Amino acid sequence: MNLLLTPFDTAPFSKLKNEHFMPAFKQAMTDARAEIDAITENTEAPTFANTIEALDFAGQQLDRISSVFFNLNSAETNEEIQKIAQEVSPLLSEFGNDITLNKELFKRVKAVFNQKDSLDLTVEQQTLLDKRYKGFSRNGANLAEDKKTRLREIDAESAKLKLQFGENVLAETNAFKMHLTNEEDVDGFPEGEKEAAAQMAKSKDLNGWLITLDYPSYIPFMKYAKNRELRKKLSLAFGSKSFKGDKLDNQENVLKIAKLRHERANLLGYATHANFVLEERMAETPEKVHAFLNELLEKAKPAAEREFKQLEDFAKELDSIDQLQKWDGAYYSEKLKQKLFSLDDEILKPYFKLENVIAGVFKVAEKLFDLQFKEVFTIDKYHEDVKTYEVFDADNNFVSLFYADFHPRPGKRGGAWMTSFKSQYIKDGQNVRPHISNVCNFTKPTDTKPSLLTFNEVTTLFHEFGHGLHGMLANTTYPSLSGTSVYWDFVELPSQVLENWCYEKEALELFATHYQTGEVIPMELVQKIKESATFQEGMQTLRQLSFGLLDMSWHGVDPTSITDVKAQEDKAFSGTDLYPSTAETCMSTAFSHIFQGGYSSGYYSYKWAEVLDADAFAYFKEEGIFNKEVATKFKDNVLSKGGTENPMVLYKRFRGAEPKVEALLERAGLL
């Protein structure tokens, strides 16, 4: 029996076999097509209920299967799953096109859309109707037949290229190992990091230490290792992922993806891919994005240049370094930070035991939104590392299921993300609650130490949990408007705003206790965390802006004449470069956010959302960071509303005014 084809509540991970997926996908697509046929063959006149609403609830089994499968492909993949992903992606893309290019279906949607002013619709229903109509028009429903055919070809090819891109990056990450056997090669390396590297070596039956390109291994080495040559080796390996002209090279994939996206936008009547994407964003146009990025660049660049000069002088004075290179940045920044603030991640880490930080983020959610998290051990999971929780509100109503998966392993892609195994929606009077997951890559416990987080990892955990809350507290009627289904440049607000609590004494005292002594984090360390929060903020801002500008250089132009990926990238980075360029590295070939994930023409949204989050947190600061009234306003107008209304309308309802860029500049110390 194929469990994926039965109605299931929690995903039946342990009972699933790889051979279940393909038949389940095919059957679910057949069933979903039948549901669409039932809509188009309905002899009654098109109404909101029998067309728009019916369409939103169609294909739910397919959605569930997709969420289970693609989450596994990210968090617990293997060659077989990757092969299935390659096979099924074009089929899903074709299925999506079968819906958006279905003439009879579009005719019915259009009929409802044309009479929308005379229908008595709620705001959420109006939003859904607009979204549905645009879903067709923006995906080719108004095109001539030959152009529709070409659109299908582009979508199928793009789906495969994106997967190939991601697989190449993962394979490159897994392929590199730096095996060290000399004690002096790990000179400067903190004890905990050393032990983790030794354990990694031991797991591969090696002596000494093993360093990989996974973040928990790569970042500490770049930050602490004295050996400059080894830092260089690691940095070049990281920066040259899928840029070596071999079978895992992504240059051709980058060019093809960019050109196909451009061709698709042109087919649909848009000047560039960015014009197409931004029509459905708060930013609206490429011009606005460029103006936004350049305004911040103008403010941040002088500060960044000052900070870089300070770093250069420091490295010269300390180690007679004549020319700072990319592999020197993290190392000397860490040393300078220690000198200026006497603050070192290694001093902080004992106060951030993973289990305590998890309990802390739960406590913050309880104080703000009255949520209770209860760990349960009866929920099926895809790996033993995963923890599962049931979430309840103050009245003990079930709110959500929460999965947490926090450690790296070979079948898991790098980075951190939030995802969902089941959407929230209301149907037949029942509020169906969501199943939400956070996935991160934090250092595993060793034989002598628990998993201790760097401060940066603490903010990452809070960040992803903010996305999680957006999913958990969803309270909308329609699944396609629920939770994080919002404009892309609004989606980072709940995640980024939650990071602010990591810097506040009131919040830190709830969970930052020494894992051995139980001592609460000393006040002077909290003060130093706050003071150092704006350390090199100019350089950090420049770095983020450079990624946004790189994204726009691929998607906000006509890329048909681009033949050299590296040259295109150098041009995009020319206004933000501080370090000398290195010929053997290229970011685009491993820039998964924009070439595999959903951030194409959207990388600017991190900074955009920072403006929102700085402005929103300023409101909390004015009233008290655990002020119930402000928290409730945030929950009722942002977290629970999903994509049911225009995000600026929701934001203004919470805040009383539009956000001000000054709030961000002030917080970053750039004013």
Image (spheres, grey):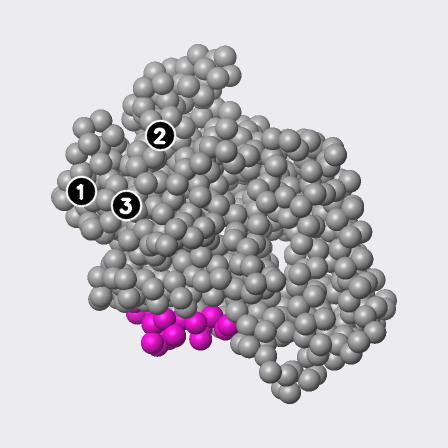
Q: Which of marks 1 and 3 is in front?
A: 1
Give the number of the disc on residue 311.
3
Residue of label 2: 451
Q: Magenta span has 660?
A: yes
Q: Earlier in the sequence, mark 3 or mark 2?
A: 3
C-alpha gap between disc 1 and disc 3: 23 Å
| Amino acid at the residue labelled 2 | Ser
- In the rendered image, the vertical position of residue 646 relative to residue 160, given as above or below: below
Q: Earlier in the sequence, mark 2 or mark 1?
A: 2
CA neighbours of label 2 inside 10 A, class few (<14), some (14 to 19), many (20+): many
Give the number of the disc on residue 525.
1
Q: Residue at x 75, y 49 (%)?
A: 28
The single residue placed furthest to the right in the displayed view is: 146
| Amino acid at the residue labelled 1 | Leu
Residue 318, by quadrant, is top left
Read off the magenta span. 645-663
83 or 318, which is in the foreground?
83
